[in-house]
Image: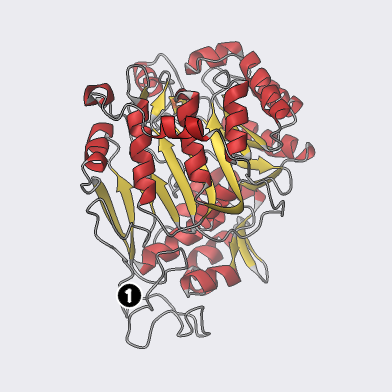
Amino acid sequence: MVEYDSSLIEADRFPNRDAPLSGLAPQVGPDADRRMPDAGTVRLDATRPHASRRSDPEPDGTGLYVHVPFCRSKCRYCGFYSVPVAGRHTGRLVDCLLRELDQYDGIEFTTGYIGGGSPTALPAGQLIGLACQVAQRLVSGAEFTVECNPGQVEPGLLEGLRQAGVNRLSFGAQSFHPAELELLGRGHRAEDIRSSVDLARRVGYDNLGLDLIFALPGSSLTDWQYSVAAALDLGVQHISAYSLSFEPGTVFDAWRRSGRLSAVEEDLDRAMYDWTIERLGQAGLRQYEISNFARVGCECRHNLGYWANQPYVGIGPGAASSAGILPVSGLGVPNAGFCVGEPRGMGVPAMTADTDHGQGAQGRDGRAPSCSWAGRPCHGQGARVTNNPEIESYVIAVENGAPIPREVQPVNAADTLCETAVLNLRRRAGIDLATFARQTGHDALRTFAGPIQRYRDLGLIEVTPGAVRLTAPALPIADSILCDFAALE
Ligand code: SF4
């Protein structure tokens, strides 16, 4: 890995340290961590690797997500947490991100992802400096993605990121129609998508992704086909295609309530989705998740980690971390190992064979063996920890060495089973039975015998000797099917 100009890094790691905090006055929007898919959100964002181009591998290790909560302007459909960057002391926030990252000293992350918000809303030097620090925490050959907005990249930025170790870029294209881009409030033109992808390729990136949105108000199947064709023309390795949802608190939601916009008919939404699967498959982009398509070996390893329910750490306002990954020192945050065991009698059939822990799902004392906060599977009780999205309180806490305001949501063993099943089923590969057993200590076929049988009878789930997965007809209605795996019967 080539070192980036260290004087630039140091200058940008702690810029604006003495800046007045007023520049960071919060504008809290709806909090939505799109890196944490759940059963109620079928089509989400996504993205892929550089070093090892294996097909749809079972990911391993701990992912790192860094949230940059700024955007140049707010898109009308956007329910993600972000605030306008104008007038913000971005360097001060970046400084805090790095300080929070320091709290996870000792973890080597297997994937890195800087998202938002819009990372490219940061000054180039700050984003490159952030990427340099993140890269130092990744294992050799790790996938390292940065989200980019079309038209917000220039050669110096992309070269700096590449030198820092970034090996994958994900562009929020959304559409190639001028009228649709205008409606969405994207702030870029179709030509910006083309020129940004072209620039990235010239700088040397060979792993590029585009996000697209279908079922836009007033759009036709032909409109959508035009955008997909334009995306394919660019020869990118990965496309995420997700259906528009009207998120509470967005301009689109208000416009729909007032009758200014209306959602497309369900049949059209379905037709667009079905056509997308077929067309992208013909073009060599294999569907590997409900909304994600990639050339073989270019699946987004970071998001595969989420869908495998692997451990992850989220840095920044609004970011979430998974069980047992809390920092062990500093910032006044207590060590929260979280693995406090799996209570007996919870009604979950345990595996009879030994698991990784050598004692089956339950330790001999009725408690799960202690899990490692460094990222090994946790069979016991845990928690999901979500930083408060409010920027000012985050910055004040970090700068004063105080605990970062966080919401801690307990995740017991039953929750872990259900979440793992729901997330796994988002993948076309579905639940790998051996991996599920190793990860949770339970047999998925027994644990979810009821919904598996019901949907198998309907032809919506198939069971093979090694896996359980949704069939093609199930994909458009995956939401409702996954709900039946979200709780134990
Ligand atoms: S650029 Fe992305 S995160 Fe920012 S407002 Fe638009 S959709 Fe939301």
Pick the residue in front: 459 or 68: 68
Crowd class of label 1 (few under 14; some 14 to 19; many from 20; radius 10 Å): many
Residue type, mark 1 in image: Gly
Residue 200, percent from left and from top: 67, 27
Which residue is at 46% across, 37% downward? 130
Q: Residue 221: x percent and y percent?
A: 65, 23
| Observer able to see residue 118 | no
In the rendered image, the quadrant that contains the N terminus is top right
The relative height of residue 150 versus residue 271 in the rendered view (above or below) is above
For the point 37% across and 68% down, which residue is it?
A: 413
Quadrant position of the C terminus in the picture: bottom left
In the rendered image, residue 320, in percent from the top left (x then y), is placed at 37, 48
Quarter, ligand 1: top left
The one nearer the camera, 274 or 150, is 150
Q: Is residue 238 above or below residue 357?
A: above
> What is the quadrant of residue 435 in the picture?
bottom right
Specify whether 302 is left or right of 235.
left
Q: Is residue 107 visible?
A: yes
Observer-nearest of 93 and 305: 93
Residue bearing the label numbered 1: 341
